[in-house]
Amino acid sequence: MPETASNSLSSFNCVMKVPSERLLFIRLGKADFEQVRSVETAGCNDPWTDTMLKDELSHANAFHRGVSVSAAGGLCAYILCRLQIGELHIYRLCTHPAQRRQGYAEALLSHALAAARSMGAARAFLEVGASNTAAVILYRRAGFSVDAGRKKYYPDGDDALVMSRQL
Ligand SMILES: CC(C)(COP(=O)(O)OP(=O)(O)OC[C@H]1O[C@@H](n2cnc3c(N)ncnc32)[C@H](O)[C@@H]1OP(=O)(O)O)[C@@H](O)C(=O)NCCC(=O)NCCS
């Protein structure tokens, strides 16, 4: 069942290019594996394996959402998170390359932060490649700041930034 955008874009100053009333936030589960995989393989340099994606989409304590602009339309972007002991952990956020700079990632992030706060979470955490400029700018705009760095954390040698924000 799609969730509406109302009350979900208030976590930070999210300026939408696609009008927020056109956005459909969709709860994702294992039945959505093919759509998620399609965006993941097109959009991520380091795509998760099918097994990782299937396991994550089946996880019980998860907050997995996609965004689309019509019920019949495809998935534009998705966010995969877990809610654990009062914390939101953001594992994956990806927008299809053909759909970028439309505000989808920012809208999904805002939606997840607002939902986590309403479910009692106090802080949100994520990890991102230091050279992933698009994502780092996006997360800083969303109120995240860097807590720590991890040198050469990723297989390609990139450093990781651990970022968090209060909810
Ligand atoms: C990072 C990513 C999720 C952004 O998705 P998006 O839907 O294009 O992002 P948005 O349209 O919501 O962008 C919001 C803001 O983030 C910043 N931003 C996004 N992409 C950017 C880029 N390529 N360069 C600089 N800033 C960027 C901008 O401030 C942008 O606002 P603006 O368009 O008004 O300037 C997307 O590039 C992606 O899927 N990358 C591959 C996967 C990934 O790295 N995920 C994050 C780590 S898990």
Image (cartoon, rainbow, N blue to C red):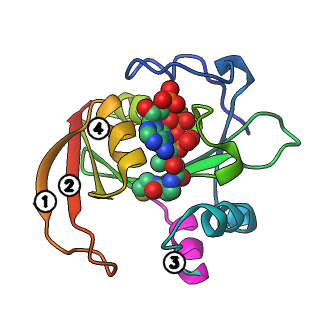
Crowding around mark 4 (Cα neighbors within 10 Å: few <14, some 14 to 19, many 20+) is some
Labelled disc at residue 52:
3
Identify which residue, 98 or 71, lies in the foreground. Answer: 98
Give the amino acid at mark 4: Ala
Q: Which residue is mark 4?
A: 121
* Marks 4 and 1 in Cβ contact (< 8 Å): no
Crowding around mark 1 (Cα neighbors within 10 Å: few <14, some 14 to 19, many 20+) is some
Mark 4 within 8 Å of ligand 1, using the beta carbon: no
Query: At 42% from the left edge and 28% from the top edge, which residue is drawn?
Result: 114
Mark 1 within 8 Å of ligand 1, using the beta carbon: no
Magenta span has 137?
no
The first of marks 1 and 2 along the sequence is 1
Tell me how far mark 1 sits from mark 2, CA to CA.
Answer: 6 Å
| Secondary structure, magenta segment, majority class | helix
Q: Which residue is mark 1?
A: 149
Start-end of magenta stretch: 50-62
Tell me how far mark 4 sits from mark 2, CA to CA.
Answer: 18 Å
Give the amino acid at mark 1: Gly
Q: In the image, is 59 to the left or to the right of 157?
A: right
